[in-house]
Amino acid sequence: MTAGDLVAALPFILLAGGACLVLLGDLLVHADGRAWVALGAAAALATAVTAAVIGTGDDAFAGSLRRDGASVFFAIVVGGSTAAALLLATGYVTRTSLPAAEVTALTLFSASGAVLMSSAGDLLVVFVGLELLSLPLYALTGLPRAARHADESALKYFLLGAAASAVFAYGIALVYAATGSVAIGALAAVASPVGLAGIALLLAGLAFKAALVPFHFWAPDAYVSAPTPATAFMAVVAKLGAFAALLRFGSAVTAPSAAGLDWRASVAVLAAMTLVLGNLAALGQSSLKRLLAYSSIAHAGYIAIAAAAGVVASSAIAFYLAVYAALTLGAFGVITLLANDDPRVDDLHGLARRRPLLVVLLGVLLLGLTGLPPTAGFLAKVYVFEAAIGAQLAWLVLLGVLTSVVSAAYYLRVLFACLAEGEGEPAAAPTVAGGVVMLAALAVIVVGIVPGPLLDAVQTVRF
Amino acid sequence: MIASALVVVPLVAAALCAVPWVSRAARVIAIVASLAVAALAAWSFVAGGSAGVRAAWAGVLGARYAVDLDGLAAVFVALAGILFATGAAASGRVGHRRAYFALWCALLAAVDGVFIARDLALFFVFWEAMLVPLAVLMWEWGGADRRGATLRFLLYTMGGSAFLLVGIVSLAVARGTLDIDALAARPIPASAQLLPAMLFLAAFAVKLPLFPLHAWLPRAYVAAPIPVALVLSGIVAKTAVYGILRISLALFPQGMSTAAPLLVALAAVGTLYGALLAMRQDDLRRLIAFSSLSHLNLIGLALFAATLVSLRGAIVESVSHGLVVAALFLLAAMLARRTSSYALSRAGGLAATAPVLAGLSTLAVVAAVGVPGTSGFAGELLALAGAYERYPAAAAAATLVVIVAAVYGLGFIRRAYHGPPLATGADLGWRERALVVPLLALVVAVGVAPRVVTDRVSDDALPAVEVTR
């Protein structure tokens, strides 16, 4: 192992090391739970800063760990999102008396898996990252023992997730059988039916993590029963890892080769199904968390539109993921500010009277999720649609804009519920989480009005 | 710089209205901001336009911040300022004043933005930005049917906008720029214009609304609070007129020309259909709604015919309809305050006790019908005469609307103010007069000298089609 290898692995080391530190510290020292959460957030933030500082460079570990623009960008977004999710948890863990150190350590381990996945140059590293990402999430889902169905949905999530991992591992085996290599770059050389079947299994495994229809069944249950800050984390970071790996595979496969067209067509079909089902299913939800769960499934569909356009759309996807991270963290952050952990939409009645600022922030986030200007959500959608039109996927774009109109119906339902008369749930006192929500809403507006810096930053995202 | 100020001033006013300790003055702030917008536009109109502003925004997406205020935009912005000031002044007794007037000013900013934007992405931003303030104003402060009406309005307009977005995105990919002037300078091949023309028109036709896409209109006009209905009909519908004029006809002249026979026919049908339905209404707001539908389709007819005369007619008629419908909505509210109902069957004989109300209503109706000397006459004459050059049959059929309009207009006056005295009420107070008289004075002024409105709009700014005989 050279110094270069160590530098390349630094974001991963910081996250995993931070997790170990929190676990050990909790054994040795008796401290307020919030201290561990804050330490974890600091480690995640340090990861983001470190990734930005070390920048791109040569691949490490004989090409199994990449240090390109994409891995840097994803490490920054994963670090930032993890820090935000942990900050959402500061007040939450004391209120719900969850084990703070465990929540923090599990979150950091999972984040380290996402970082590993997004910088992998090798299918086995992707697999290790995938498992490292997933296992803590199963545990987080089952953590609130008191909540109804937490055990059930954790077990369901675990069983389905284990099956998806097995499928993914089998895909690696088939690709290895076809090409004799586990490097991601070797996917370009696949031509035999066995290898193509392997690629299909790899796609299925990642689609599970990204919650693309029809691999989404675990998501709503897991999202509802996990502690809300963990839900926010899950919705953002699991998607970041999955789409980063998906794009890495896509960039190898869509190089002029036999599998290129099939890959893009498959992703396009997944995108279409996800858009339609995610948005339609969200319409009928009465639980706010479940509604946002389907909304995040639907957003995976919009990202998949660009993924279907191929590697030319990397920048559009990176932009969309960054904006989606802010929107989702903010929206789930609003739920952490409510007294009830699983509020129904009707519980929001009267919120505008009691907490007008919170409703304004929620309104901005919901507009962003709908993709309405002047938020960054609008530009993200335009970027994705432009990439898809450029790749002759006009039918997918038309489906995308029409399902956006459908999405307006359920997002606005939430907003109008806040405006309605009524008592509803009392809101918790504003804490650090309130600051995170405000920051997310502000970021969404500022990027919508001055998108230049972020647009420039995503131009460096190359796989 | 003036152009940007037209958006910034209302936004600052919106922020001010939301601040707790100034909320007592929220209505005054809203009125002052609206009048400032009108004054800026009028000044720029007289001075002959301003220098546009172009700055970087989202270059990768082909979008720039490009705004300009030429004569054509200034006419519409000035109308917006006048109507928003009137509407704010008429919002005397609303609850939750901070939120109401903040949204009111935000809506004005968005409407101004639509008129000054010279980049399609920026245009779309402002176009969609109008929706949320409008929807919340209707949802929170509307009448009995507000929920259903708001949702229907939202789904119709967002459905239209979805096609507009596809059109804009495909233009951005195909041309690399979304600057309206740059796009106009390098025309799209004639054979490829029909599809984008229809995608853009989908949004404009819903917002106008062109027959048969008008199902949201009567419900929205009845459910919305009177000041919101006033701006919805008076100026928000005109953003569609402006969009067709500035974008559809300018960028896709051949595409629009190909579709023109069908569009003109639909508009002619809509003109008559709206007027015929207006004849049968008992609710005064529904009467105004269908009368508006008729007038707006007449404007559409003039736009789709796209001769130089008809386009000038569309502009004059837009201004005229904006002023007249505002006066009608205000007078309807004043009438309803006296009879406790918008039902015409509950009014009658009010002229005896409220002669000024009756007189002003008669003047407004006369202008709506299009009697010479009022703005309605000038607008309708230019619109129909211009359309006749290209589509004589449709224009001739639409001309029948003048007769139907006289029937429903004078029917309203007769039922509300004459005949057996079913209701009594005091005459207009000075506040009420101060709201309506300026609007009607402008109606007469434009009627006497319609040239003032269109003189500053150069022929080059009008994307007219050459009429060959």
Image: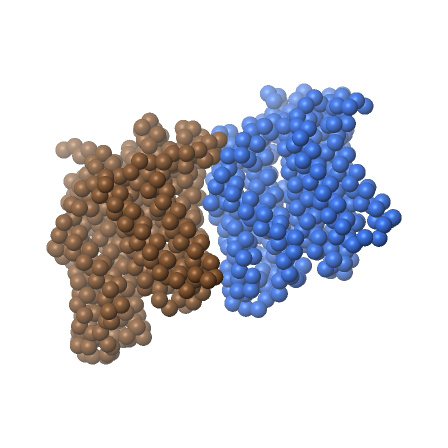
Chain colours: A blue, B brown
Foreground: B290 or A68? A68
Q: Say above or below: A310 vs A345.
A: above
Residue drawn at x 35%, y 34% is B180
Residue drawn at x 33%, y 38% is B68
Q: Quadrant of the C terminus of chain A?
A: top right
In the rendered image, which quarter is residue A62 located in? top right
Q: Quadrant of the N terminus of chain A?
A: top right
Q: Say above or below: A90 vs A315.
A: below
Tell me how many marks there are: 0
Q: Say above or below: A120 vs A220.
A: above
Residue A259 x, y percent position in the rendering: 63, 25
> Given the current orientation, which residue lies at the most extreme front position?
B21
Q: Say above or below: A306 vs B318.
A: above
User: Do we see residue A448 in this rendering?
Assistant: yes
Residue A391 x, y percent position in the rendering: 51, 29
Question: Is A27 on the left-hand or right-hand side of A234?
Answer: right
Question: Is B142 on the left-hand or right-hand side of B289?
Answer: right
Residue drawn at x 68%, y 28% is A54
> Given the current orientation, which residue lies at the most extreme right position?
A28
Foreground: A102 or B371? A102
User: Do we see residue A203 in this rendering?
Assistant: no
Residue drawn at x 51%, y 45% is A445
Foreground: A286 or B29? B29
In the rendered image, which quarter is residue A275 located in? top right
Residue A109 x, y percent position in the rendering: 76, 41
In the rendered image, which quarter is residue B86 located in? bottom left
Residue B177 x, y percent position in the rendering: 41, 30
Question: Is A145 on the left-hand or right-hand side of A318?
Answer: right
